[in-house]
Amino acid sequence: MAKSPSTSAERKKHSQAITEAVHALYAARMAGAVDEFVSYFAADARLTVIGNPALSPAAGMRLGREDIGRYLQQLHDNNAYLSHRIDDIVTEGDHVVVRWSAEVRFLDNGRSGTYEILDHLRVRDGLIVELTHFYDTGGIAIARGRVKIA
């Protein structure tokens, strides 16, 4: 990921570089390409999944590339990622917001669904230093059988 630009032409080039990097980052995430995925993160990066651990055992914070890589591997051990779509990428200074969706099949019960996701990234020196991940924890808890609905 590129450093924040100062001129209009630099901003356009920066925006294109961010867009390309985001698409590559999410392609690596969906493919379970751990080494490629973590290469976008600073060595001391923080990834936080927002949610209640009772509904979403993946909720919590991961610190550093190794921990982030283990998290991605765990996701792929438990889920099949069938497709994804990036809807919006918004950049402002060192902040990047990505609105996207993923079609996921849960390997433990075979259920699948498409889930909306919002990620907030903070970038420093071309690397992600923070990623905060927001998703439909209730919908996934229902699909996983953790929450019963009438």
Image (cartoon, rainbow, N blue to C red):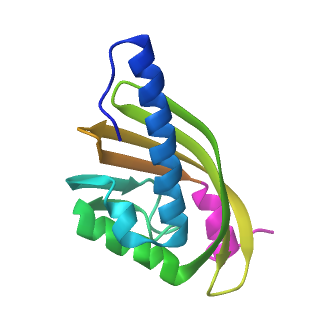
Q: Residue furthest right?
A: 150
User: Residue at the location (32% across, 14% down)?
Assistant: 6
Q: Residue furthest top?
A: 7
- In the displayed structure, 128 sits above or below 75; it is above
Count the numbered circles shown.
0
- In the displayed structure, 19 sits above or below 106; it is above
Among the 4 quarters of the image, the one containing residue 126: top left
- Find out whether residue 140 is within the magenta segment: yes
**The C terminus is located in which quarter?**
bottom right
Q: Where in the figure is residue 5, as x and y percent of width and height?
A: 33, 21
Q: Residue furthest bottom?
A: 108
Horizontal relation, residue 123 to residue 115: left or right = left
- In the displayed structure, 111 sits above or below 89; it is below
User: Residue at the location (39% across, 20% down)?
Assistant: 10
- Find out whether residue 115 is within the magenta segment: no
User: Residue at the location (68% across, 76% down)?
Assistant: 105
Horizontal relation, residue 66 to residue 94: left or right = left
**The N terminus is located in which quarter?**
top left
What span is in magenta? 136-150
Viewer-nearest residue: 62 or 23? 23
Horizontal relation, residue 14 to residue 102: left or right = left
Q: Residue furthest left?
A: 44
Q: Where in the figure is residue 125, as x and y percent of width and height?
A: 23, 38
Viewer-nearest residue: 100 or 62? 100
Q: Where in the figure is residue 85, as x and y percent of width and height?
A: 67, 52
Q: Where in the figure is residue 112, as x and y percent of width and height?
A: 73, 73
